[in-house]
Amino acid sequence: MQGRSRFIGGLLLLILGAWVLHSFLDLLAWAVVLAISTWPIYQQLLASTKLPHKVSWVALALTLLIAAIIFVPAGYGFSRLIQEAQLIGQIFNTAQTTGIPCPEWIEHLPLISSWAKENWLRFLGSSEAAKASLHWIDSGSIFNYTKDFANQLIHRFFGVLIILLTLLFIYQHGQQLGQQILNSSRKIFGDKGYRYTLHANSAVRSTVNGMILVGLGKGLLMGPGYAIAGLDNPAILGAITGIFAMIPFAAKLIFSACALVLVAQGHPVEATGLFTYGMVLTLIADNYIRPVLIGGAVKLPFLWTLLGIFGGMETCGMLGLFLGPALMAVLMSIWRDWLIDLNKSASNFS
């Protein structure tokens, strides 16, 4: 009776703690994912460092490195966004004052050039037409959009800070935390709990490795495609595509935009070829290569890996990309152990 009461009391406290921290659970999960994926690097740095208090120094250095990887590209992108927003504001002011003449590239569009030019002049060709077309833009709405964007930006910034602080804590106390998790798994699942924890850990790490390898591969393959299509700076475009390709289906934003640029320049054949090439690469990489890379590390069947990726993303967003395969790996391990025990029971019975 006392043990049951202790279990119920502990469960209630666990639920209460989860309710208190529910707004931060996704941030804590991101920190755990980062810690698992970078733990081998952390261990190598520890082994090569002979400074006193090396755990704290290495943990701080690696956390700052990850912070730089996150904030430097984000800061550059934000600065570019501000510049583009100012340019768009100038275009809107010019449009409502003198109108915007039809760009020359519209006249070279195949099949629809006359229709496109006519509609451009009707909606933006004069100040009166531009004011009528852009009447929904006013200072009040722009102020509200800017305010909401700033609030979201501040919220995301503090969210990343919480992730980094949690990551620093995990680095510093990772050995003790890992041992406690293994002991808890062994207490819940028996001697097999150790293996379940290792499978979940391997699934998360292989997911990260699969993301990086697929991104690098897609970036390297799209670079020549951009060059053949005649776009400027194909190497830079390939690198940007590789970064976006680490997120499933996100690379489509880059090569689709490049295809639109080619259409605007009057090259519909090259645009169609580039878009088709990018879609084929995305289909193969995200639906076949990535699941194989993730499932191969934990001996997870292809179908369950694919369902774990898509189901996890459907349920938990980007975080589900890591949690889904990890959960599938643990469930598959439990299923295999259950089948083994069932066969042993059948053998003993016979």
Image (tube, rainbow, N blue to C red):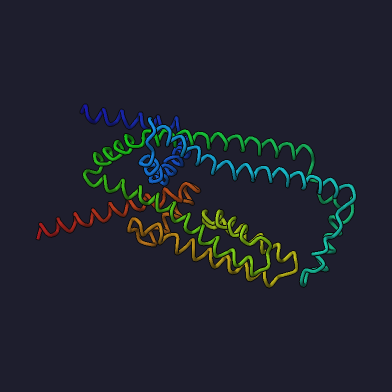
User: Front-most of 12 and 312?
Assistant: 312
One can see residue 128 in this view: no
Q: Quadrant of residue 231?
A: bottom right
The quadrant in which the C terminus is found is bottom left
Q: Which residue appears at 27% of the width and 31% of the height?
A: 7
Q: Quadrant of residue 14?
A: top left
Q: Position of residue 193 (x, y in %)?
A: 26, 45
Q: Count the marks: how many?
A: 0
Q: Position of residue 32 (x, y in %)?
A: 42, 41
Tell whether 173 sits left or right of 81.
left
Q: Which residue appears at 50% of the width and 41% of the height?
A: 66
One can see residue 341 in this view: yes
The quadrant in which the N terminus is found is top left
- Residue 23 lies, with reference to residue 326, above or below; the image says above
Q: Position of residue 63 (x, y in %)?
A: 47, 38
User: Front-most of 302 and 134?
Assistant: 302
Tell whether 117 sits left or right of 49.
right
Q: Which residue appears at 21% of the width and 26% of the height?
A: 2
Q: Which residue appears at 46% of the width and 51% of the height?
A: 321
Tell whether 174 sits left or right of 346.
right
Q: Position of residue 275 (x, y in %)?
A: 62, 66
Q: Quadrant of residue 167?
A: top left
Tell whether 182 sits left or right of 39.
left
- Residue 103 lies, with reference to residue 82, above or below; the image says below
